[in-house]
């Protein structure tokens, strides 16, 4: 699936919920299904700066795609990074770099997060794009 197709799928899923409490619960559920980062990658280098809670992100090139794994010490943040990983893992670096982020606004995520969590979300996206940029430059 393309990034856009996955993003559209996420938007459709979020549209099924009537209120934000249900959406928060769904985000937490997504976090519980997150493919966790290996302990060896839970290092200071992999912590996303700008997040209120600890979030570790690891990207690995597998053939011509990037596979992301992550973890967080906060349940909501773990769900947020799970959404991003679902959209961008197993995708080509160039596709990640050119991807539109409108789906974040479409699901209403940014407007329903505290300012510090919204900053963390921006940092998570920036880190994913930095991995893509690094792998793109390497190739």
Image (spheres, rainbow, N blue to C red):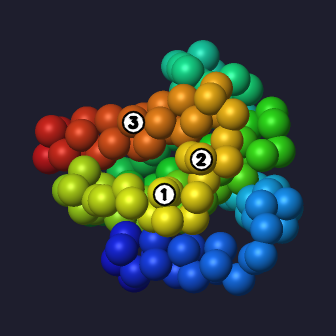
Name the residue rendered at 38%, 56% in the picture: 101
> Marks 3/1: CA distance?
16 Å
x%, y% of residue 55? 66, 32
Q: Is residue 137 left or right of residue 89?
A: left
For numbered disc 2, what is the local secondary structure?
helix
> Marks 3/2: CA distance?
18 Å
Q: Are marks 2 and 1 in contact (CB under 8 Å)?
A: yes
Earlier sequence position, callout 2 versus callout 1: 1
Alpha-carbon neighbours of circle 1 within 10 Å: few (<14), some, or many (≥20)?
few
Label ID, residue 105? 1
Task: Please name which of the two marks, 3 or 1, marks the residue nearer to the observer.
Answer: 1
Q: Are marks 3 and 2 in contact (CB under 8 Å)?
A: no
Earlier sequence position, callout 3 versus callout 2: 2
For numbered disc 1, what is the local secondary structure?
helix
Q: Is residue 111 left or right of residue 104?
A: right
Image height check: is 124 above or below 50?
Answer: below
The answer to whether one can see residue 74 in this image is yes
- What is the total number of numbered labels drawn onto the structure image? 3
Choose between 49 and 132: the one closer to the eye: 49
Say which quarter of the image contains residue 108: bottom right
From the image, tell me which residue sits under label 3: 126
Name the residue rendered at 46%, 78% in the picture: 8
Say which quarter of the image contains residue 17: bottom right
């Amino acid at each position: 699936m393309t990034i856009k197709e996955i993003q559209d799928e996420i938007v459709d899923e979020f549209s099924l919920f009537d209120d934000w409490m249900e959406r928060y619960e769904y985000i937490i559920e997504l976090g519980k299904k997150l493919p966790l980062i290996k302990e060896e990658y839970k290092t200071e280098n992999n912590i996303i700066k700008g997040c209120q809670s600890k979030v570790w992100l690891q990207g690995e090139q597998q053939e011509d795609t990037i596979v992301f794994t992550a973890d967080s010490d906060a349940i909501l943040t773990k769900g947020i990074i799970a959404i991003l990983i679902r959209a961008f893992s197993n995708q080509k670096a160039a596709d990640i770099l050119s991807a539109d982020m409108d789906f974040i606004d479409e699901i209403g995520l940014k407007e329903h997060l505290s300012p510090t969590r919204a900053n963390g979300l921006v940092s998570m996206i920036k880190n994913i794009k930095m991995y893509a940029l690094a792998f793109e430059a390497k190739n």
